[in-house]
């Protein structure tokens, strides 16, 4: 059997079993085992053991459970409601203020937790009823919640970054630092869009009544008590990495400890919170590590059989030039995002696309950050979009899927606009990693 046919069969069967609902880690390992035994022989088991040892020799993987624990503890501390209330009193007097409050609160909460589902469901429970009460446009209200929640996969600490970095063999610290600025820029684009639309069409996002507005002293009090502590925690974790004070794993440990202190300061820390956070962290980490094992098995067989070279030759042979090839790879990621989970996409395409990007002369840190930004669209693009179904699960009956689908479209367009901006001006993504000495140039 030709290498081309083996390549086609491995990728087709893998995507097929994942779409049938089999766990991603077991799908990767299962396909690798079958093809490894058939085309390599029983000795493939020795390769598997060696690859698994190499994969788990990366100490940065310890940061995954620590950041997950940090996020869950913060989620349980009730910080989301505090953030929304603070943003509500500061921005509610503006047209579209509640939607902007939702995006701003989601940005901070997503940065603190790194969990998309927690952000979307929490804001769906807290913010959506408030926006509906003030007769906000339903699609825009839903879009603001989904788009704000999706930032959790980009703004550090991001689980996607912790999974992506070792898969692409790039610095975790560089990606964590580099992802912060594009996340803030995306959030600013969302806020600008909401502000402009509601200025032109006030009925889409009316300001709250003057009787409900609070004095400046109250706004400052809520800012210092609810917003500032979380922002300090986020900046302390990233700052420790940026200034070389701590490695990502050490920064994650500091973040987890600080999250416990923050929950205690809000009088939300008890045995049940610690128990729930520990169990949830264990389950989520086990899932991620199983995917790492499966990916190590799959890539070892795929590359050993020469399938990676076939894919590389086919992509580099495209008559589009290097930017055409890059756009083609991003298009594949967006299409896959409509049907597959992000972690499956990372494990399938990153080992294939990263060497191609290097041969085309693109910076590996820039390419990784661009892929993460593009992957963020998978949380908004139907039919598989996580954020849509998270929100639908907690939304009132009057909110239909059509409202949510219609609402996310403008924000998907803004994401694609951001991708174009970061492609034209790559230094936006590379400035922080270079300043920290974690990227060349």
Image: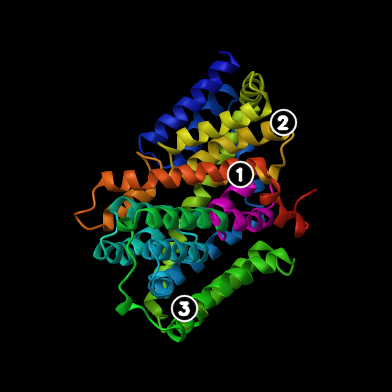
Query: Dot 1, how many residues are within 10 Å of its Cα: few (below 14), some (14-19), or many (20+)?
Result: few
What's the residue at 56%, 58% (across, down)? 184
What's the residue at 42%, 75% (across, down)? 86
Decide: is 341 above or below 360: below
User: What are the residue bounds of the magenta stretch?
Assistant: 154-183
- Residue where numbered disc 2 is placed: 360
Q: On residue 421, which mark appears?
A: 1
Total marks drawn? 3
Quadrant (top left, top right, bottom left, bottom right) of the N terminus = top right
| Element marked by disc 3 | helix
Tell which residue pokes out farthest to the top in this image.
1
- Report which quarter residue 48 is drawn in: top right
Which mark is nearer the camera, 1 or 3?
A: 1
| Element marked by disc 2 | loop
Q: Is residue 214 left or right of residue 227?
A: left
What's the residue at 51%, 66% (across, down)? 112
x and y percent of residue 87 in the render? Answer: 43, 71
| Nearer-N-terminus badge (3/2) | 3
């Amino acid at each position: 059997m030709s290498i081309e046919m083996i390549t086609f069969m491995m990728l087709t069967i893998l995507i097929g079993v994942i779409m049938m609902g089999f766990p991603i880690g077991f799908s990767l390992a299962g396909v690798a085992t079958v093809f490894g035994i058939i085309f390599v022989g029983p000795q493939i088991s020795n390769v598997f053991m060696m690859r698994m040892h190499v994969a788990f020799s990366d100490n940065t993987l310890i940061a995954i459970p620590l950041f997950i624990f940090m996020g869950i503890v913060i989620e349980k501390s009730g910080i989301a409601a505090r953030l929304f209330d603070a943003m509500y009193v500061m921005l509610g007097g503006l047209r579209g203020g509640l939607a902007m409050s939702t995006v701003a609160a989601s940005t901070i909460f997503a940065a603190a937790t790194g969990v998309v589902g927690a952000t979307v469901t929490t804001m769906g429970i807290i913010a959506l009823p408030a926006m509906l009460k003030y007769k906000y446009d339903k699609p825009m209200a839903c879009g603001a919640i989904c788009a704000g929640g999706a930032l959790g996969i980009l703004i550090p600490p991001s689980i996607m970054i912790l999974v992506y970095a070792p898969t692409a063999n790039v610095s975790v610290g560089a990606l964590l630092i580099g992802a912060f600025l594009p996340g803030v820029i995306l959030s600013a684009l969302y806020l600008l869009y909401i502000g402009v639309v509601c200025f032109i069409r006030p009925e889409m996002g009316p300001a709250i009544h003057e009787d409900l507005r609070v004095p400046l002293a109250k706004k400052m009090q809520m800012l210092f008590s609810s917003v500032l502590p979380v922002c300090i925690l986020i900046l302390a974790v990233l700052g420790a990495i940026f200034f070389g004070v701590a490695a990502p794993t050490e920064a994650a440990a500091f973040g987890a400890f600080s999250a416990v202190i923050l929950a205690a300061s809000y009088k939300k820390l008890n045995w049940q919170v610690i128990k729930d956070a520990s169990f949830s962290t264990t389950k989520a980490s086990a899932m991620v590590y199983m995917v790492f094992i499966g990916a190590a098995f799959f890539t070892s067989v795929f590359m050993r059989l020469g399938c990676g070279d076939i894919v590389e030759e086919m992509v580099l042979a495209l008559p589009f030039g290097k930017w055409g090839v890059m756009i083609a790879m991003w298009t594949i990621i967006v299409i896959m995002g409509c049907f597959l989970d992000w972690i499956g996409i990372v494990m399938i395409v990153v080992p294939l696309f990263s060497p191609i990007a290097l041969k085309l002369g693109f910076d590996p840190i820039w390419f990784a950050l661009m892929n993460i930004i593009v992957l963020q669209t998978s949380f908004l693009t139907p039919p598989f979009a996580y954020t849509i179904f998270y929100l639908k699960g907690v939304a009132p009956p009057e909110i239909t899927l059509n409202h949510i689908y219609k609402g996310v479209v403008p924000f998907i367009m803004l994401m694609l606009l951001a991708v174009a901006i970061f492609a034209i001006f790559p230094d936006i993504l590379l400035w922080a990693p270079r300043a920290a000495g974690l990227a060349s140039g």
